[in-house]
Image (cartoon, rainbow, N blue to C red):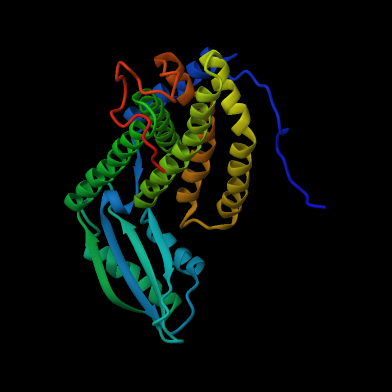
Amino acid sequence: MAFRLRLVPAQTNIDFFRWQFLTFGFSTILAVLSVVFLLIFGLNFGIDFRGGTTIRTESTQAIDVGVYREALQPLGLGDVAISEVFDPTFRDDQFVSQVRISAQDGVESVTPETISAVEAALKAVDPAITFPSVESVGPKVSGELIKTAIYAVLASLVAISFYIWVRFEWQFAIGAIVSLVHDVLITMGIFSLFQIKFDLTTIAALLTIVGYSINDTVVVFDRLRENLMKYKKRPLRDLMNLSVNETLSRTLMTSGTTLVALIALLVLGGDVIRSFVFAITFGILIGTYSSVYVAKNVVLWLGVKRDWSKKDPKEVGSPFSGAEVD
């Protein structure tokens, strides 16, 4: 007999609009607080954005990241990231690592004296170590990376809004964008409040959150469109509740199983990927919440075309309305 795990009953009848002003007010307060945190505390930019130096090391001895970190601890270098590099082309006795040191406050780049001190400290714990390359990222390059990261997030939001507009109606696109901005803004607010390191991997996490959240939202929107065609006389609010209830099991199962893997990575994955995993973990939680309590509320307030089986005589909405886009 097949065993089917369910986090919620197969059929639910939850009124997700019962506390709509409370939930939407809660989301608004979190978003405003996130902006305040960003303005007051800013973000704890990592080496990618602040500038710094990357030292590539090679050794014939196995690399112990913990020993390297302890060796550099007395130097008081601040944000230092150490990672081992794996490559199938390496020899059996070739062990490579990257030591990334952020620029200190008020200093544009890591000084040659600091680099020499790092090399001496690492040689003390691994006499076989060599330093084949030292690369620095200046503040100008870091500023360009920040701009590029912002452009990447904005471009993804614009592309998603166009996709939603084409597939559904402009009201759905606005609901989806409000939901995505809500997710990204609150995630950045958490990073600002707790001063979690914010680097290029965090940008990758934000883009992942955008993709994950819009996937959840599109599932709800798709079911809503089906129900709009099936129940032409039923109030829009009831159809939205029905659509969320019908997709609730799928939403919670997907989010729950993903979170199990992410929590394991968060606990056991180590410092190198911790900020990346934390961003995705929090993003999935807030993305699931916004799919249920934010996106559809915006669509309800804007109103939608009711009969999707006929062409809108007023031609309100997307010129592609009714087109099948898969």
Q: Quadrant of the C terminus?
A: top left
Residue 178 vs residue 274, the one in the foreground: 178
Residue 269 vs residue 39, the one in the foreground: 269
Residue 249 vs residue 311, the one in the foreground: 311
Residue 326 shown left or right of residue 107 in the figure: right
Residue 256, given in percent of the width and then of the height, sits at 62, 43
Residue at the farthest front position: 310
Q: Where is 324 relative to 271, above or below?
A: above
Q: Where is 190 relative to 240, above or below?
A: below
Residue at the farthest right position: 1
Question: Number of marks in the image?
Answer: 0
Q: Where is 1 relative to 238, above or below?
A: below
Q: Where is 314 relative to 146, above or below?
A: above
Residue 191 vs residue 317, the one in the foreground: 317
Q: Quadrant of residue 150?
A: top left
Residue at the farthest bottom position: 92
Say if residue 197 shows up in the picture.
no
Residue 289, given in percent of the width and then of the height, sits at 54, 30
Residue 52, given in percent of the width and then of the height, sits at 27, 57
Residue at figure coordinates x 54%, y 13% from the top left: 233
Residue 293, given in percent of the width and then of the height, sits at 52, 24
Say if residue 269 shows up in the picture.
yes
